[in-house]
Every structure is written in structure tokens, then in C-alpha cells.
Image (cartoon, rainbow, N blue to C red):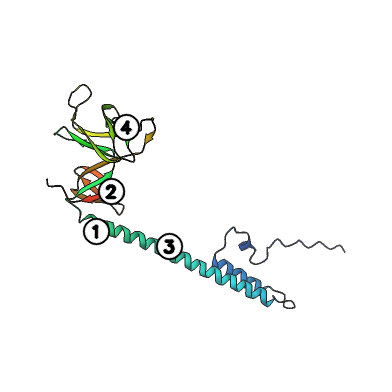
Amino acid sequence: MELEPIAGSNREPPGSELLNRTTMEKDDFLKLLIAQLSHQDPLSPMDNQEFAAQLAQFSSLEQLAGINFNLEQSIQMDILLTQAFNNTLATTIIGKEVKAVGSSFKLDAEGSVDLTFRLDDFADDVEVVITDDAGNVVRRLSANALSEGEHSLGWDGKNADGEAVPEGEYHFAVTATRADGEDISVTPLITGTITGVRYENGSAVLLVGDREIPFGSVLEIGMVDQS
């Protein structure tokens, strides 16, 4: 009588599905350790040192998971405290003068404005280019021999032909060079009186008239000059 060959089993040993993963969590590690103990050879049990080493690895994994959780909680708490501090502080500065990094400004009915910027070094030549909200050049201003620090150039609200430009949003860009033509770093600044505070995604935004200034762009806040 011929005997049919017994088909080989395709079933994988317990715990093998965990080994096929690219990452393991602490529960997976514990399941794998229990499966290993349950299916060990009674005649050749796991070595005590090997078992102790695996327990130590499990303990380390548990501690690392705890540290990671505590670190995430700490980061979230720091973010919430920072936002709460900024939001509370913002409500106390309405009516004060603010200076921030920015190159946009609003030309109102007065038709004149001071354009402020900061030079990182002495500049032989400085040019300020004023553009409208569409990017068209409206006026160019120039200055010579300006020292390191903050400076302001006044614009009378007129274009190159001497005609008054309409009220609205404008922008300015400043370039500065030394006598040898080397560029100097320039930071455009905007100033004004804080008229309100708005909150956006948990962060404070300062209002200067109808202009919005992110709190992170603020360089200085002080009392309004009454002189």
C-alpha cells in the first residue's frame, strides 16, 4: 500500500509575526518573551543569564517609553505656558508704542510717513524703493554716509513726478552699500501705537490701526512719546 506524503505545515511558529515587523512596542516585546517561554524545550530550558538579559531589555524599553511620554507632556506644557504668558502680556500693552520687523505700511490722508530701518554697519550709499500693493515702483529715496544703527527717511506721499499717490498699502525695500560696493545687511522696521490684540491659533497678533503684527516680529515695546 502506498502512503501519501504528509503535507508540510505552513504555519509559522508563535511570535513570528512580531519578528516580521520593522518596529516593536513594549506589549509586543512582552508577548514575544511569553511565547518563547511557553514553547521552550523542557529538556533544554532557557539559560538564566539569557533570560535575565531579556528581562533587562524589557525593563529598559519600559523606561524609555515612560521617558518619551513624560517628554512629550513636558513639551506640550511648555507650549501652553508660553502661549498663556504671551496672551496675558499682550492685554497689558494696548496703547504703547511698538517696533517690529516689517516692510509694509499704510499711507493715510496725511500723505506722509517716516520709513525706518536698521543698518548693521556704516553705509556710504542707501536707497529706499517704495512700491504699491501691486508691486509697482512709486518712489526712490536715497541717502549717503549713514552710521550703523537706526535711521528714518521721510516720504511725502508723492511719486517721482511730484504727484500725490492715493491712500493705501505700500511697501519699502532698503539696500545699503559701502564705498567699495559691498552690501550691508539692513532690517526694515515698522512702528506704531498698539490699538488692540487679536488671537490666532492660540498666539497673539498686535493691531496697529488696521495693520497686523505677529508677536514674534516685535523687537521693542515702550511708552508713547508725548513730546
Q: Which mark is residue 88?
A: 1
Residue 4, picture quadrant = bottom right
Residue at the disc numbered 4: 124
Depth check, mark 2 against mark 4: the one in front is: 4
Q: Amino acid at mark 4?
A: Asp
In the displayed structure, 158 sits above or below 148; it is: above
Residue at the disc numbered 2: 218
Q: Give the side of residue 97 with respect to residue 7, left or right.
A: left
Closer to the camera, 198 or 30?
Answer: 198
Residue at the disc numbered 3: 72
Callout 1: SS: helix
Residue 155, picture quadrant = top left
Contact, mark 2 vs mark 4 (Cβ under 8 Å): no
Q: Where does residue 12 sit, x and y in percent of width and height?
A: 68, 63
Q: Of callouts 2 and 4, which one flags the residue occurring earlier in the amino acid sequence?
A: 4
Picture mark count: 4
In the displayed structure, 215 sits above or below 182; it is: below
